[in-house]
Image (cartoon, grey):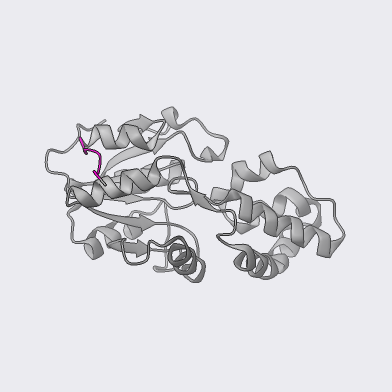
Amino acid sequence: MKSLPENIRGVLFDLDGTLLDSAPDLYAALVAQCVEEGVAPPSYPPVREVVSRGARAVLRCAFAERGEAALEALTPRYLQLYQNVMAQQTQAFDGVDDLLLRIEAHGLRWGIVTNKAAFLTEELVSRIGWAGRASAVVSGDTLPVKKPDPAPVLLACERAGVKPAHCLFVGDDRRDIQAGAAAGLYTVAVSWGYLDGGDPHSWGADKVLAHPAELAALLQLQPVVA
C-alpha cells in the first residue's frame, strides 16, 4: 500500500454506492417491471447488494430463469423505468454533502468516474444538484472501456486538471480499486457502500474507511463554517 501523497489536489469518486445511495430507485424500477411482466418481485436486500454491477445484474434478481438473451431484451425497458423514478428516493450517503463542501472549501477538485451510462449519469448528477460542482464526470460509455480499466480514471484526472499522483480514487467496488491503482492514484475503499457482496479489506486498497467523515479527517479538511 502507498502512503498518502503530500500534495493532494483532487478526489475522484465512484457514483452509485459511494456518493449516492441510489439502490431504492433502482429497486423501484425493478418492481415496476416485475408488475409489467407478471413476476413476483424479489426482496430488496439481494438487489441492493448487486446494483453496482449494473442493470443486467439487477434484472437477474427477478428474471434469471429466462436466460441471458431475455435479460438483454428486458434491459431497455428497465432503464426507461429507472429514468422515470431516478432521484425520487436517491440521496447522498450520510456525511457525503459535508465532505464535498470541505473538499471545495479546501480548494481541491472532485469528480466522478462511474460505469453508469452517460444519459443516466448526467441526468442524475443534475437532479442531485452537482452538475456545476464536479470538475469531471466520466461515464461508462464515455470511452470504449470502463472500470476496472484505468482509462476512465485517467481521463477524469485530465479533465479535472490534476495529476494521478496527486489524486485519490474512492469507491465501494473491487473494480474501483483496480482502476484507481492501475491509473496510479491513491485508492480508498469505502465500507458504507454496496460492496457487491465482497470484503473491501481484501481488495488491496491503500485505505479502507467506514464513513465520509473519515476521509475528511484523512485529508485534514476542516469543517465549513456556515
Residue sticking out furthest to the front: 226
Inspect the magenta stretch and tell me whether residue 224 lies in it.
Answer: yes
* Vertical relation: 109 (above or below) 95: below
Q: Can residue 78 be seen in this view?
A: yes
Q: Is residue 178 visible?
A: no
| Residue 160 horizontal/vertical position (percent) | 23, 61
Number of marks: 0
State left or right for residue 105 relative to residue 189: left
Residue sticking out furthest to the top: 201
Q: What residue is at 81 percent from the left and 52 percent from the top? A: 65
User: Which of the image's four quarters has the N terminus?
Assistant: top left
Q: Which of 192 and 157 is in front in this view?
A: 192
Q: What residue is at 42 percent from the left and 63 percent from the top? A: 139
* Vertical relation: 72 (above or below) 170: below
| Residue 83 horizontal/vertical position (percent) | 60, 67
| Residue 213 horizontal/vertical position (percent) | 34, 34
Magenta extent: 220-225
Q: Nearer the viewer, residue 49 or 89?
A: 89
Q: Magenta span: helix, strand or loop, mainly?
A: loop
State left or right for residue 139 relative to residue 49: left
Q: Which of 14 and 150 is in front in this view?
A: 14
* Vertical relation: 154 (above or below) 212: below
Q: Which of 157 and 26 is in front in this view?
A: 26
State left or right for residue 37 relative to residue 113: right
State left or right for residue 173 relative to residue 110: right
Inspect the magenta stretch and tell me whether residue 73 lies in it.
Answer: no
| Residue 85 horizontal/vertical position (percent) | 63, 63
Q: What residue is at 40 percent from the left and 69 percent from the top? A: 142
